[in-house]
Image (cartoon, helix red, strand yellow):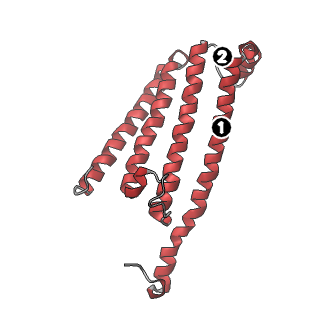
Amino acid sequence: MSIDKQNLGPLPALIFSSRWLQLPLYLGLIVAQGVYVVQFLRELWHLLATTLFPADLTAKAAEAVAHGADAGHSPETTIMLAVLGLIDVVMISNLLVMVIVGGYETFVSRLGLEGHPDQPEWLSHVNAAVLKVKLATAIIGISSIHLLATFIKADELDTKTMLWQTLLHLTFVVSAVAIALIDRIMSPKIAH
């Protein structure tokens, strides 16, 4: 049953139409996605440059130290940290896609992707609760990458910093489990 726009009174029509105010927010997130693409390409270029042209590392190491980075890592550790940085950018970008596509589909308007070969599998059953659980698990993944990078650089950090980062990560994990449990309690008929 479709809603006939002419049957809506002015106030309900205004309230229902207000969902379109979120459109600039989603467009802004698309711009942020573009910024992450640029960041990814910069980090990838830096990884390639430091791997393919190690003779240039002396000048680059001095510049990195001048900008607050530690140039004392082994080449393997440097590569690992760079790859973790790339993975971090990709995971945040994936989070942006979930928010943009899922949020728009849930709160603004249908995208009309039914039957499209590239429709994300999760989009067919997305709602606010599912979106929250997916976002929480994505944040855990991002936090895991940061925590791994922290432990790789453990000799540079004090114990208090590492403890706080670990506690923050565990807080994300507990929060995600709580969100998933609340979702399961609130909708027990849906097969999970």
Question: Could you tell me how many numbered marks the image carries?
Answer: 2
Indicate left or right for 44 with 4 as reference. Answer: right
Residue drawn at 68 percent across, 33 percent down: 42
The mark closer to the camera, 1 or 2, is 1
Residue drawn at 57 percent across, 15 percent down: 76
Instruction: Tell me if residue 6 comes above or below residue 75 in the rendering.
Output: below
Indicate left or right for 124 with 32 as reference. Answer: left
Residue 41 percent coordinates (x, y): 67, 35
Q: What's the amino acid at mark 2? A: Ala
Give whichever of discs 1 and 2 has the lower sequence position: 1
Return the residue at label 1: 39
Residue 68 visible in rendering? no
Q: What's the amino acid at mark 1? A: Gln
Relative depth, front residue between 22 and 189: 189
Return the residue at label 2: 71
Indicate left or right for 174 with 66 as reference. Answer: left
Residue drawn at 45 percent across, 59 percent down: 115
Indicate left or right for 35 with 85 as reference. Answer: right
Relative depth, front residue between 110 and 9: 110
Instruction: Tell me if residue 97 comes above or below residue 144 in the rendering.
Output: below
Residue drawn at 55 percent across, 43 percent down: 93
Task: Specify few, some or many for label 1: CA neighbours under 10 Å numbering under 14, 14-19, or 20 or more.
Answer: some
